Image (tube, rainbow, N blue to C red):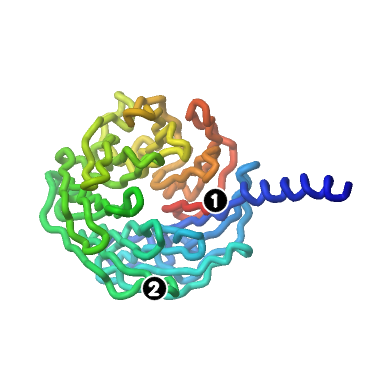
């Protein structure tokens, strides 16, 4: 009888642990311009904040934060969840770097391991390959990207390759030079995709040697920002920061090429622009896609046709804050969290997994200048 009672208790405990995640929040500690040298504590942020997130209730518990980390604006969790990598978007010339932390999952604490130069100004994106053996950093202001091997200690080694883009786009105010905004590994990390907002270009790169085998042009003035792949590995979706559109592609596993399927607005027909779309994610089950719009302060919701990858607009939800720079879905797909950078808030939405629609839970987490949300 004792074992009959103990077994369901163990099952409940296991389920509870499975619905509890660590939430990492990257922030701006320095809100100065991209080329100046202002004070490093201008926002009041401590750097990276760590919370325990309960996917059953949507509640968070503050666990820890870093100290003396300048502008950890974008984060990446290594496969297995043992380490965290962070851009240091210093907003000072030649000071861009990549910081590495050990994750104490039990206590929710980060231990600084060290940092390396990003080899470019103001890195805005960092990503790891599927095996955690390589890390890619996109230098936004520097217009370049760097690939590093990762050693057994988690630290990046000598750069495998550093590629500097050249040229400019059609918008003299925003595209006066290359601006590499993201570096995203494709399915199985066979190819790496580089989104250059300044050149209206998506490059397909071989991670092993850094060769750009394909350079795809997006519409003039579109400003490609972030790319994400469908969970089935057959489709990819690009958010245009300046164009305000989502581009759907079919992925070619033989070449890494992306064949255009669709270009659909991420904003209502009544929106006049200028557009400042920012982030894009597919739900874990692949049925819905979400995109954030900073100018309209909304999350756009799309359904995804599973066989074709085509999108259908379902509507828009206000983010209840200013500058929704980044958002994330929890691993269960039942929650969507939005980081409103200029409102110093993170807003929690319940996801209707049958319709894809979002409903505010009423929960608000106050964090200075949140710029990136990652969950493990």
Mark 2 residue element: loop
Q: Residues within 10 Å of mark 2 (few under 14, many from 20)?
A: few
The residue shown at (26%, 60%) is: 207
Eyeballing the image, is 306 above or below 27? above
Residues under labels 1 and 2: Cα distance?
Answer: 36 Å
Residue 75 located left or right of residue 196: right
Image coordinates for residue 309, horizontal then vertical, percent: 33, 31
The reply to whether dot 1 and dot 2 touch (C-beta < 8 Å) is no
Residue ranking furthest to the right:
1
Front residue (pair 332, 371): 332
| Residue assigned mark 2 | 151
Front residue (pair 343, 152): 152
> Which quadrant of the figure has residue 161?
bottom left
| Residue assigned mark 1 | 366
The residue shown at (46%, 47%) is: 339
Image coordinates for residue 185, horizontal then vertical, percent: 32, 53
The residue shown at (22%, 35%) is: 260
């Amino acid at each position: 009888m004792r074992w009959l009672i103990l077994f369901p208790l163990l099952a409940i405990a296991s389920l509870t642990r499975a619905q509890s995640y660590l939430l990492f929040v990257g922030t701006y500690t320095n809100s100065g311009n991209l080329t100046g040298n202002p004070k490093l504590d201008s926002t009041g942020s401590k750097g990276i904040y760590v919370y325990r997130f309960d996917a059953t209730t949507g509640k968070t518990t503050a666990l820890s934060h870093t100290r003396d980390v300048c502008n950890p604006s974008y984060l990446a969790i290594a496969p297995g969840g043992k380490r965290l990598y962070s851009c240091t978007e210093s907003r000072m010339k030649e000071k861009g770097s990549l910081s590495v932390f050990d994750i104490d999952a039990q206590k929710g604490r980060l231990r600084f391991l060290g940092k390396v130069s990003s080899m470019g100004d103001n890195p805005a994106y960092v990503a790891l390959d599927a095996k955690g053996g390589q890390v890619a950093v996109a230098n936004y202001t520097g217009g370049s990207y760097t690939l590093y091997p990762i050693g057994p200690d988690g630290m990046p080694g000598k750069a495998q390759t550093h590629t500097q883009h050249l040229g400019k786009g059609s918008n003299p105010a925003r595209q006066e030079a290359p601006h590499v905004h993201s570096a995203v590994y494709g399915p199985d990390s066979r190819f790496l995709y580089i989104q250059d907002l300044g050149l209206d270009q998506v490059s397909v790169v071989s991670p092993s040697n850094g060769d750009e085998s394909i350079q795809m042009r997006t519409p003039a003035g579109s400003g490609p920002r972030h790319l994400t792949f469908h969970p089935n590995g057959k489709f990819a979706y690009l958010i245009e920061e300046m164009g305000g559109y989502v581009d759907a592609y079919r992925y070619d596993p033989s070449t890494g090429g992306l064949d255009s399927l669709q270009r659909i607005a991420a904003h209502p027909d009544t929106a006049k622009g200028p557009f400042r779309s920012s982030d894009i994610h597919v739900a874990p089950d692949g049925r819905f896609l979400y995109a954030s719009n900073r100018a309209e302060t909304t999350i756009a919701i799309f359904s995804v046709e599973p066989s074709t990858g085509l999108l259908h607009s379902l509507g828009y939800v206000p983010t209840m804050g200013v500058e929704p720079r980044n958002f994330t879905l929890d691993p269960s797909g039942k929650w969507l969290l939005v980081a409103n950078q200029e409102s110093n808030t993170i807003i929690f939405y319940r996801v209707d997994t049958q319709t894809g629609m979002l409903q505010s839970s009423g929960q608000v987490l106050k964090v200075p200048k949140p710029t990136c949300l990652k969950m493990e």
